[in-house]
Amino acid sequence: YAALPPAERHFYEIIREARPCHLYFDLEYRRRAPDVEGCGEEAAAVEQESRRLETDARVDALLELVEVALRETYGLELDRRRVMELDSSTDTKMSRHLHVRLPGAAFRHAAHAGAFVRKLVARAESLQADDDDRSAARRSRAALLWAPPLGAGSERQLVVDLGVYTRNRAFRLLGSCKIGKTARLSNT
C-alpha cells in the first residue's frame, strides 16, 4: 500500500452486514468555492483556515451530542482520544470521516449504529426548537449539524450523512482516494 503512488490508493474497509461495528460518521456538505481570486496567498490561507475552524466546530458539536447520547443511552463515556478523524475536503465540499472506538463496546451492526445516529439527529432538531433561554448555547451547538443553504430557494444541509448505515458499506481507508479523484483521506 505504502509503495503505491497516492493517486493509485483506492482501498476500503467493508463494514459487513449483521456484524458488530464501531460507531462511525460520514460528515459532508457542499459549499461555495472560496472567492480569493486576485487576493494573494495570504488571503487564500486565511480562507482555508477559516473553513477548517468551521469544520472543527461542527465536529466538536457532533461529538458533544454523541457524548451525552452515549452516556444517557448506554452508560458509556466517550474518550475523544479514541475518535479517529479523517478529512478529504475540497474547495467545494467539506468531507470528514469519524471512527469512534468505545473500549469493550460495539454496535450490533451498521443498522443499529444508524438508528443511534438518527436519534442523535432528531435530538439536535428538538434542541433547536427549544426556546428556553437556558438552552441557547446547546441550541446554537446543535444548529452546527446543518450547513447553510447554497443559494436562494435551497434548504440547509444536514452535515451527517444518514445513508452510510447500510449493509456491507465500503468506507475509504486513511490515505486512499476515490477512483478519478485526488482528495485523499488524511488525519486532521
Image (cartoon, helix red, strand yellow):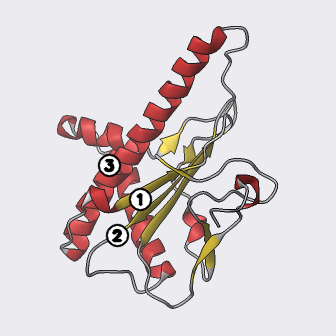
N-term mark: 3 or 2: 2
Label 1 or label 3, whichever lies nearer to me, is 1
Quarter-of-image position of residue 152: top right
Q: Nearer the viewer, residue 171 or 62?
A: 171
- Which residue in the structure is indicated by mark 3? 127
- Which residue in the structure is indicated by mark 1? 84
- Hey, what amino acid is under mark 2? Arg
- Which residue in the structure is indicated by mark 2? 101
Q: Secondary structure under badge 3?
A: helix
Give the residue drawn at x 69%, y 28%.
33
Determine whether, in the image, residue 4 is placed left or right of residue 78.
Answer: right
* Circle 1 Cα neighbour tier, 10 Å, few/some/many (<14 / 14–19 / ≥20): some
Give the residue drawn at x 62%, y 76%.
169
Quarter-of-image position of residue 10: bottom right
Q: Nearer the viewer, residue 131 or 72?
A: 72
Residue 89 drawn at (x, y percent): 61, 43
The reply to whether discs 2 and 1 touch (Cβ–Cβ < 8 Å) is yes
- Hey, what amino acid is under mark 1? Met
Q: Secondary structure under badge 2?
A: loop
* Circle 2 Cα neighbour tier, 10 Å, few/some/many (<14 / 14–19 / ≥20): some
